[in-house]
Amino acid sequence: MTAGTIRIAPSLLSADFAALGDAVRMAQDAGADLIHFDVMDGHFVPNITMGPPVLKSIARIARVPLDVHLMIENPDRYAEAFVDAGAASIAVHAEAVVHLHRTIHYVKSLGVKAGVALNPATPVSALQDIAADVDYVLVMTVNPGFGGQTFIPRSESKVRAVRALLTAEGSRAPIAVDGGIDTHTAPRIAAAGAEILIAGNAVFGTSDPARAIHELRAAAGAAVGS
């Protein structure tokens, strides 16, 4: 992932799990840039979702990159399985690993992009010594575990701080945001420096998901002049 224009990544966490293939096809046809795949283990976060077999099935029909968000303990143990299943990028949580530098470079060695995710209460300084190594940063704008939560307003200043840190380290790695992203929050968070907008309920919780994707892109693009 490289920095640039706004990209929309619909999150399958809010899709109908009985019709994930239809959700992926719809999102692609509506112009989604990525498909976001949330993995939860019931330990790191209080929920359990999908694993490599589901991702492998989705990969058979996906025409856009599959972005995997590992909200799990010991992500090193499972990263290769998700890469084999079709992941194009994998984000691990700074809070979930002991040796973050080692984990990031391990993910990179598997031939995919490696990102670091930060929970709302995790300080930006957690990126200080890894900023030059990451391919992207995922700022959680809600506490992870469930879809449909309310955007945390303080996230805007956090995104600005992440952008400043990355710039200071000579990195143009893009910033992704996840949680409470809709047509009201998208312009604000895009103006703060986010370039990848992950949206679940705002897309799949509507009667017209394709229109929702277009409206999200337009709202965010207007805020940054793209």
Image (cartoon, rainbow, N blue to C red):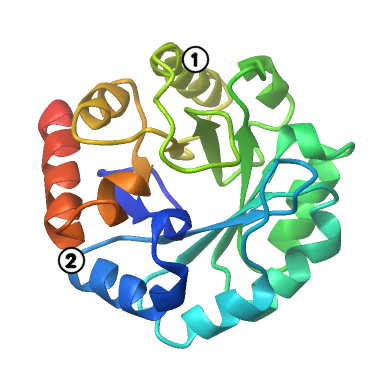
Look at the image and tell me in which quarter the C terminus lies: top left
Q: Is residue 59 left or right of residue 100?
A: left
Element carrying mark 1: helix
Q: Residue at x 75, y 49 (%)?
A: 42
Residue position marked by numbered label 1 in the rendering? 161
Q: Secondary structure at mark 2?
A: loop
The CA span between labels 1 and 2 is 32 Å
Q: Which residue is mark 2?
A: 30
Judged from this view, the residue extending furthest toward the right is 98
- Height in image: 217 above or below 60? above
Residue at the image point whose x is 65% and y is 80% from the top:
53
Left or right of 14? Residue 138 is right
Most foreground residue, 80 or 46: 46
Which amino acid type corresponds to the residue marked 1 in the rendered image? Ala
Quarter of the view holding residue 11: bottom left
Bin the neighbour count of mark 1 within 10 Å (Cα to Cα): few under 14, some 14-19, many 20 and up: some
Where does the image place residue 198, in percent across and percent down from the top left? 39, 45
Callout in the foreground (1, 2): 2
Residue under the point 19% across and 34% down: 183
